[in-house]
Amino acid sequence: MDGVRFYRADASSQEPSKLVRRTKPARVFHLSWSTNLDECEQNPETAYGPARAGLMSLLKACKETGSHLIFMSSDGIFGDPHCERFEDSPPCPINHYGRGKVEAETRIRDSGAAWTIVRACPLGFNRHHNRGLVNWAVQSLTEGKQVTGFADSSFTPLSAATLARMLASVARDEAGKILHFVSAPPISKYDFLRMAARILGAPETLVTKGSIRNAKFKAPRPGRQDLQTREPEKRVFEIERELEASLAS
Ligand SMILES: NC(=O)c1ccc[n+]([C@@H]2O[C@H](COP(=O)([O-])OP(=O)(O)OC[C@H]3O[C@@H](n4cnc5c(N)ncnc54)[C@H](OP(=O)(O)O)[C@@H]3O)[C@@H](O)[C@H]2O)c1
């Protein structure tokens, strides 16, 4: 992204607010959060810490400097499968990770700073840590290993490249809005892995159909993770292209 400088700072600390006061940026992209749902469940401070003192002081700094905070939230704020999942739907989280993001969103909305909340499910090859759905899918399928995909768990993921482009396009006149960026149609983890196998040239038979109800996670996982948007003409991307871009990343 042209004109964007990256800083690494502990989101639970005062460091980000000090950076903002020092650099007075027009926009602040807040992307850092623990994505380890099981760790958040076992150690709730991991989920709530970044939503508390560090965020409060960052919001205060943004208000002082007039910086526009663009906050990366999550599809994880919707957990109950019966919930609607639009920009204005009430959140219904089912684990600490989701509740931590809801707490952060509430603080941001009440802050008086200029803010935009983005909700999406990013998907890309993680070069820093060997973890995540894409790393696991690419490694397993290219090595000919059998994988299980949940047929009863759907989501609307976006490639990291598309998400970065959409984040960069968030303008000041979108302050005060919640934006959903989604792929369509919603896809089950099972169909997603079969599509990944096809794109990678691996046999689709490597993917076994499973159920999220039989998975042994520490944090409850939603059966539905898909996001909906009231602005489909601007914010919906085709799932196969998004998956191709993620696998190529
Ligand atoms: N992955 C998903 O399925 C998903 C879905 C919806 C929304 N999101 C959101 O998208 C954003 C980016 O996540 P990602 O998918 O790129 O996951 P990721 O690869 O796990 O990246 C998260 C990054 O945040 C850093 N981090 C964690 N806690 C931090 C803290 N207290 N202070 C500073 N940095 C911290 C991590 O540092 P380390 O490198 O040290 O671990 C990691 O580099 C996050 O806000 C996440 O909640 C992710």
Image (spheres, grey):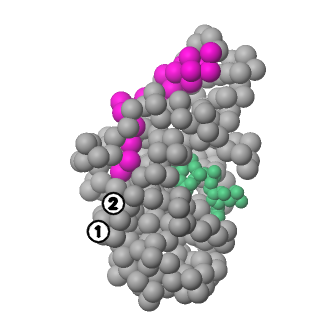
The quarter of the rendering in which ligand 1 is drawn is bottom right
Taking depth in this image into account, of 73 and 170 the one nearest to the observer is 170
Q: Would residue 159 appear left or right of 36 to someone viewing this image?
A: left
Q: Are marks 2 and 1 in contact (CB under 8 Å)?
A: no
Q: Which residue is mark 1?
A: 173
**At x 75% / y 20%, what residue is drawn?**
143
Taking depth in this image into account, of 55 and 82 the one nearest to the observer is 55
Q: Would residue 103 appear left or right of 40 to someone viewing this image?
A: left
Amino acid type of disc 1? Asp
**At x 46% / y 81%, what residue is drawn?**
62
Per the model, the C-alpha gap separating discs 2 and 1 is 12 Å
Q: Which mark is residue 147?
A: none
Disc 1 beta carbon < 8 A from ligand 1? no
**At x 53% / y 61%, what residue is drawn?**
2
Dot 2 or dot 1: first in sequence order is: 1
Report x, y in % for residue 201. Answer: 62, 15
Residue sitting farthest toward the front = 2
Please say whether residue 38 is visible from this viewpoint.
Answer: yes
Q: Quadrant of the C terminus?
A: top right
Q: Which residues are magenta?
A: 180-201
**At x 34% / y 56%, what residue is drawn?**
179
Dot 2: what SS? strand
Q: Which residue is mark 2?
A: 178
